[in-house]
Image (cartoon, helix red, strand yellow):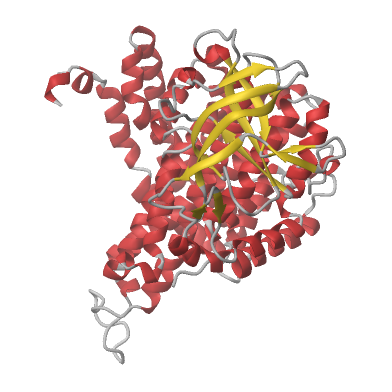
Amino acid sequence: MASYTAPLRDMRFALFELHESDAIAALPGYEEMTRDLLDPVLDEAAKLCAEVIHPLNRPGDEEGCRFENGVVRTPKGFVEAYRLFRDGGWAGFASKPEWGGMGLPHMVGTLIEEMLCGSNLSFSLYPLLSQGAVNALLAHATDELKQRYVPKLVAGDWAGTMCLTEPHCGTDLGQIRTRATPQDDGSYKITGTKIFITGGEHDLTDNIVHLVLAKLPDAPKGTKGISLFVVPKFLVKDDGTLGARNGVFCGAIEHKMGIRASSTCVLNFDGATGWLVGQPHKGMRAMFTMMNAARLGVAINGIGVSEASYQGAVAYARDRLQGRALSGARQPAKAADPILVHPDIRRMLLTMRATTEGSRALAVWVGRALDLFTHSPDARARQEAEDFVALMTPVVKSLCTDLGSESANIGMQVLGGHGYIRENGMEQYVRDARIAQIYEGTNGVQALDLVGRKLPAHAGRYLRTFFHPVGAYIEAKAEDGELGQFVQPLAKAFVRLQQATGQVARLGLGDPEEAGAAASEYLRLFGLVAIAYLWCRAAEIALRKIAAGEDSDGFYRAKLATARFFMERVLPQTSALYAQVMAGGKTMMEFEDAAF
């Protein structure tokens, strides 16, 4: 059976060394967030995930959620595990202390989210959706609505959802039909059906707070006519206690390929009472506060599952005896050598390791920018951080989930036939990871967002937050002795990215379908260059530590070797991606519709 242990050594490297969290601790509001405080927090989170949450992963997948007489029951042990999670204060790890949360920096929260996703992806989705609801309410709701809902959400006593998709529309939300009718008391009656609602109904909390997109009677057509409403499962009395059941009910749960212990619901709103969040017809702006956070969270889904699959594959490769090393028996006293000796097994494991650690570094980098955006006293630093997060959100969502799914498949391949068997736990990672490439905006939509919105925004201002620091680093380090073997491949890939960016921008001005045709390959090219930049910085740290004799456990030697593997065996993908981008879209757009 697969096991999971939080990779704390690498997490601490990303947090304290690569991204220098001490600089974040110097920001107003984060003064107490020193390593002395954060180290035990990470330890406790790792313990909870390994001892309480991960043991429910496989049995939860096998049992799944049950829909009985309009009520959803989570698998055995989930209620008790959630109670421990809530009572430990973990539901509010990313929320501000004034609302009852821990107030941890985003870059730390990124790592805790990864632990939750790696130990049990289904379980992780319940509290993570609640955090998104908190973000949207704090950014856009009235003080009255904040006071009524946010403290309970932060405490984990209540859970949150976001209700966007309807049976006839997903990405094209301008087509939604859910209606909101104004009432004399300032509330609204919400009527319609939403589908694919994660955590829409369950037995973990006393109340569920739905954030629902709907249209007012006078709404303009399209997305400009969408408003956002808060609709609780149970109405809340003025004293904060729960009142009557609201008119929102689960009509069914979806029977899914993966994340089977996460309840994915059809919700029917039958004149349910709701309250407007933000301004009329400005619901998309408010919902994007929640969706952008969710997209970053989904990126971490991919990283967590990738790490778990890597751990399972490594353990199997060490123990499974099969064949002999090509250079001669490594363990002649045994019937065969462990499959870890075989080049192709090592190729697979190192691919998983290099992309997982690189993705982790990338996610923490974006988390660091979020901390600067929310806490820096310098207006320019806040603006640059906001621009960077806007640019990188579609990149990390798409790249980390693609790599996570690929890693899960590789992990199953390492186990061969045993990977295909449910009892060994590896095939579940393949099934669970696959949804992350689809929900919160498919990865193709993320690519369109990157080339269609983020690249041209403010005359390319967003791009400067990435291109300038990477270009400056290459210029400063290209001739830096041993580091050159890492910087030179980065420099070549960076030139390809710059040329591809110019190509996409130029063609997109005349024909948006040309930019769309190149979008997915361009995003992956962008993401791999970003990870290569972080691997260069990681290699620089490793070289310095090794030279100083500070590598007694071999961590930095392994980090250096993994960086070298990424540069030699993963980064060359950028050559093919560049060729695909530059080829243009004629071969796909001129293909006759009738021939499909």
Give the farthest residue toward the bottom: 333
- As rendered, which of 382 and 113 lies closer to the eye? 113
Residue at the spot x=49%, y=15% of the render?
456
Question: From the viewer's perspective, is 594 left or right of 16?
Answer: left
Residue 551 seen anywhere in this rendered image of the structure: no
Residue 494 seen anywhere in this rendered image of the structure: yes
Residue at the spot x=22%, y=18% of the render?
589
166 above or below 222? below
**Residue 583 pos. (x, y %):** 25, 23
**Residue 54 pos. (x, y %):** 56, 65
Q: Which quadrant of the structure image shows residue 575?
A: top left
125 above or below 425? above
Question: How many numbered markers are drawn?
Answer: 0
- As rendered, which of 46 and 462 lies closer to the eye? 46
Residue at the spot x=34%, y=78% of the render?
320
Image quadrant containing the N terminus: bottom left
Question: From the viewer's perspective, is 195 left or right of 342?
Answer: right
**Residue 52 pos. (x, y %):** 62, 67
Image quadrant containing the C terminus: top left
